[in-house]
Structures are given as structure tokens and as C-alpha cells.
Image: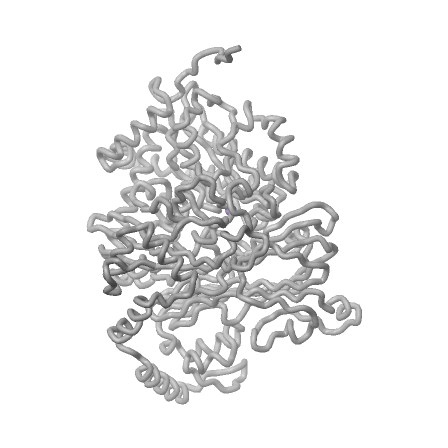
Amino acid sequence: MTVTATQPPQAIGWKGSSLREMLEESERLFEETGRYHGIEDLTMLADDPIRYEKIFSRLRGGMVNARETALNISASPIVKEIGELCFALYTPEGDSITLSTGIMVHVHTMSDAIKWMIRNDYEANPGLAPGDIFCNNDAFIGDVHNADVQNIIPIFWEDELVGWAAGVTHVLDVGAGKPSGMPIGPVNRFEDGWILSCQKIGAHDTVFRDYELRSETAVRMPWYWRLDEKTRITGCQMIRDAVHRVIEQEGIDTYKRFMREVIEEGRRSFEARVKQMTVPGVYRSPQFTDVPFEGEQELPPEAAKDILMHAPMEVTIGVDGEFEVSFEGASKWGMHSFNAPPSAMQGALWVLLTQTLVPNDKVNDGAYFATKLNLPYGSWTNPDNRTVSTTISWVFLIPSFVGLFRCLSQGYAARGYLEEVIAGYPGTWNMSQGGGTDHYGRPGAWTNFEHSCVGTSAGMVKDGEAACAAMWNPEGDMGDVEAWEILEPLLYISRRIRPNTAGMGKHRGGAGWEVLRFVWKTDDQVVYNLGEGHVFHGMGLFGGYPSSTGYRLNVEDNNLRELIEQGRPIPHADHDPEDSELLRLVDGRVVKDNRCVHLPTPVGEYDLYMSMLRGGHGCGDVLERDPSAVAADVNEGHLLPRFTERVYGVVTREGEGGVEADIDATAERREQLRRQRAERAVPVSEWMVRTRERVLEKDFIYPVADMYRQSMELSEKWAGEFREFWELPEDFRL
Ligand code: MN
């Protein structure tokens, strides 16, 4: 039997063309002219700027309205509490016109997903009609990881497709072998859980019953999955309505012209901004992150090794505002879940640019068209193997891009825009997750998204702010304690600012914070930690220090229950690792180490779990910090007293509202510290000679040697630069 379509597909593109033809034409025009759709003059903007701005504002308002309405439909605390969702509007070819606030990293990932459907002729099969609903969470198509689930709907006007609306939320569980949305442990894609590759899941504005039934068994908490899906679809439909209203009032030709111009305007304003704010040149900022998997019993032997990720970021800025980011020399993809496909990397670049170079302009895919991103094939940024795991691509992605802020800040400083300088962003760790039987006796999995509130970094003119943002969701919120306690079988004992989490400097980073929780009403539970434990996330800027790295601290099989029953003092925090309140007040089996990325470990009721949220990086020399600001840091709980003199050279004495700086003694102490620095300092030329000997002898610990070996094998260019820098023989290999 042959199955044939009842009628040939009707072209739904403009002027009788197919979507694929439209996409190819758009790409050809950009290739030939360097301008979006080849647009030369922004005639609409020039002739009727007020109307143009009004259309933009109405569309943009439609996005924000969709997001604000939709997040109240969701029951998932990740969406409802911290706003981990985002909506965007696209051209027929999948280029973003405007977007809501939220997890903006996805504005470009969803663009990739739409283009993937077009390139795969979805127009012919499975077909594209008004009311269709698609779902995607495939990072190799257009996503960061499969916990970020997207719904995409086409928008029609009469018989033509005039665009797409798309929305994304981060879900609580992805149905992987290990619980949670971002399980640690998968070593290939087949262990990543449920992945939908731009699947058609509905028609006529109705989700297919077979898909709904499948979701019942595909993930651990289908009720959250369904509500999150309703959230996204509702938002998309609201966007479709907003577009229809604009077309009704302005006319379809105006709308079509507008979408082209607004993206080209976005591209031009990006270029103008680069020219205005930075100095042309090559900027470099390598980053590393650690995965201490050696000894993980559950992993296959080839995966159970210590790993260092290498992200040698290079930013090249041209005299006409050309902007290229390259990861040439990045290490290889691996048998872990931290591989990041190109779509994830492109999304990250985009979301960070909106927080630095283009925070005020009409943000859309114009910025994408104005930038180039080089992701070496075979590296963790662009795996040459489609079966790799990507459940937490963020683990490498977040540290790797911190260099972008650093590079841009050097450009701003060189140009004189000192107030724009920022020393990077901290990792959004510790990310706590877990799962098992929850406190209601149901199967459950959780990710606590309070890590969307880490400290911000210092600038050249100000300190960072405590506990307030995430690089992937600049509008993040930590969520209410009570909301997390509904989701996860852990009770909070406290949430408080954690001293010494922020990088020190003339201006210090914003503080991180600490949470102490204990397992409640279940003995069937596993927990994870996630974050750097052996390396720093960034380096600080212009002499400022990086923020602290992390450690894991659990107290298992403890006497907390007795302490509570007997009415004796219970711990509220770890606070100071050299004098831990937690370890002073509780007896039990202490798990304390730097294995901050590990497979899930079982815990029992009353087991204590400490989570330290990171602070921002510092900027400028510590010895230049205002002594009274250092005293205030101690009084406000941002700095442990013993570090005032040791690090800042600030001598304090007891004053009325806490400690105060002794200005004369401080001047003397700082003079002494400066002398010590001069005595300890070694000329770079001497240091290089000494270090070169180590390089020649390959005197590296295994993860470092393995990392450089991968980089050298993958990139002849990077290997050549490495050999040249250290004056190594031509045949030097690791
Ligand atoms: Mn996510």
C-alpha cells in the first residue's frame, strides 16, 4: 500500500514561495550585502519614526504581557517563582524580531529550531497550518539542554505564514535514568531522558492526546510537565493575537516591512555600539572548569576521570565594528553531560551581549547578524558526535563565557567608558538538585533554582550587589523558601549572606549566600552538588580577586533530630570554614571535600545539606579599597574580620556600630604590604624561564596535561601558538 498526501502541499511562504526558498533567499541577501535582507535604507524608520517605534512597543509589550500572564498559569516553582521562561516573535525564516524578558538565552536557540524545521521541509511533512503546535528540547537542533522545553507555533495571515511565536520554560524532570532536570551522570544522549526534536504535538490549537498520554510516563512529574506546556502554549497564542492586532491596524505590508527593518536596525546599532564603546584589537581570556569524576563508581571506566575544560576565548574587534568570538583551542567533547552544541553557545553569546554591549537598544537577532562565533568542530563547543550527552551544557558554557565580560571591559576601559566595566559574572552555583520519593510519598525530582541569585561583580566605579542575578536570566529571583519546600523534601533552616564569597578588590564583588537544609520525611532521596571546586570561575579584573570557589558539605547520620527534640541549639549555617557553626553543633558523618560535581548520592531523613551560592568578582587593587568600606564589609557580614588586615591591609578597632578603620595604622600596614609585594615579585622574564622548564618536562597533573593534549590535537593553530609562546621544539606533544 502506498500512502500519499491527499493534496500537494500549498506554498505558505510569501509570493507563492516555500519557507525554505524564503530562508535561502534571506541567507543569500545577507551573504551578498552584509545587511539583513539586503536592506539599504531604513525607510520606514526614516519616514515615520513614531509609527515605527509604536509598532515595536506594541509587539514588545505583547511579549512581556505573554510572559507575565503565562507564568501565573504554571505550577512549577522554577517558572512561577523565579520566572524561568521567555517568549519571542520570529520572522517566517526564524529570525527574532522582539522578545520578552526572562531566560533570554533562548531567543536564538528557538531561532535555530525554527530554521531546522524549515530546512527539513516541515512545510510538506508534517505540514504547517494555523493552530499547529510544535515542541522541541533537542540541544543539537536549537536548545541549551533538554530541560529547556520549547513550544513553537506558526502565525498565519490569510494564506501566508507571517511568523512564529515561541516560548520556553525550564522543567523539573526530563525522564532520565537519574532524577532531576539536569542529571549528572549521563555519558551519552541515550541516557539524557526525553528528547523531542521539533515534534508536532498538536493541531487546531489542541495538544494531541497521544502526546499527552506519552508525557504521563515519560517524566517523573507529568503534572508539572503538562502545566508548563500550557504555560508556553498560552503565551505563544497571546503573541499570535498581538501580531494579528498589529496587522489589522497597520496592514500586512507595513508589518512585513517592519520586521525586516527592525532586525537590520538591530544589526546596525550593534555595530555602532561596538565602534563607539571599544577599541579595535584582539582580546583574550582563557577559562577553565573542573569535573572531578575520578573514582565515580557508577561511571564506565573511560568516563570516570578528572577533567579540566579548556575555553581559550579570543575576541577580535575590527575597525568597522566587526565582532568575532573564537574558541579555537577548546578541549574535546567528552563522556559526560557537559557538552554544549553550537546552538547553546550561540544563545549564550547572545544573552551576554544583551547584558553588556546592547542593553538598551532594540534587542533582536540583529545582534546575531552582527557577530561571528567560531566553535571548533570536535571540541566540547561543537561536538563531532551527535550521540554525546548535553543535560547540563551550562557547566562548561557558563565559565567559558565569563571571559567575554572581561574582554569587553578591557575595551570599555581603553575607550574611557569606566562606568561600563564589570569584572565578569560568577558561576550560578551551587546548583542543588535531587530526587527519589518526596515528602508526600510520590516519585519526585527537583532542581532548586535559587542559584539564579548569585552576586554580581564589581565594576571600576562600584561594588557588586549581593544575591541578585544570573548570567542566563538577568531578571532572576531566588524564590520563596516555602515554594521550594513544597517541591523538595528538604526543609530550610536558614538563608543568609555568606562572607568571603565575593572577590576582593578596590571594588569588591557582591556577596553570595548560604543555605542550610535538611532532608525531611523521606529516606529515599539522592542529592547532587554542582559548581567549581578546584578552580576559580573567573580571575577578577585589573588586580581584583576572583570570587571564591566552592566545596560540598553534608552532615549525614547526625543527631539533628535529638537536638530538636531536646530543645538544644541547632546550627543555622556553616558561615566560616575555620570555625563552622554547623560542625560545632552537630555530630554525624561529615562529607566535606571539593567534589562539587558528582553523581547523585543517597541521603536519609535529617541529613544536613549546605549549599553556598557564589559571589561576584573583584575589580582593582585590594590595597586601594577605601578603609571605611572594608570596615563596613565586616559590619555587614560580607567579610570575615581576619581578612581585613591580611588581604586589604586595613587595621580595625572596635567602634560604636562595629569595627572601624584605623587610618594611620592602615597606611602603615599597606606600606608594609607593598614592600612585601615588591620583595616577593619576580620579573615575568624569570618566571617564564622557570615555567618553561616545567612545560618542557611536561610537569603537569593529569587533567591539565590531558586538557592541553586535546587542545593541541584538535587545533594545529592553537598548538602552534602554544609552542611559540613557550619556545618549544616543533615536535612537542603532550
Ligand atoms: Mn535550562
Residue in the picture at 43% in, 13% down: 8
Left or right relative to 517: residue 681: left
Coloring scheme of the render? one colour
Left or right relative to 221: residue 393: left
Q: Nearer the viewer, residue 578 or 591?
A: 591
Residue 706: x and y, percent?
A: 40, 58
Residue in the picture at 64% in, 71% down: 582
Q: Nearer the viewer, residue 713 or 495?
A: 713
Residue in the picture at 27% in, 43% down: 268
Left or right relative to 673: residue 598: right
Q: Nearer the viewer, residue 496 or 158?
A: 496
Residue 61 seen in render: no
**How many marks on residues?**
0
Residue in the picture at 58% in, 62% down: 611
Decide: is 574 above or below 98.
below
Residue 400: x and y, percent?
A: 40, 55
Residue lying at the far left in this picture: please name it. 319
Residue 692: x and y, percent?
A: 29, 69
Residue 139 seen in render: yes
Decide: is 98 above or below 437.
above
Q: Nearer the viewer, residue 682 or 89?
A: 682
| Quadrant (top left/top right/bottom left/bottom right) for the C terminus | bottom left
* Picture quadrant of residue 482: bottom right
Residue 664: x and y, percent?
A: 39, 89
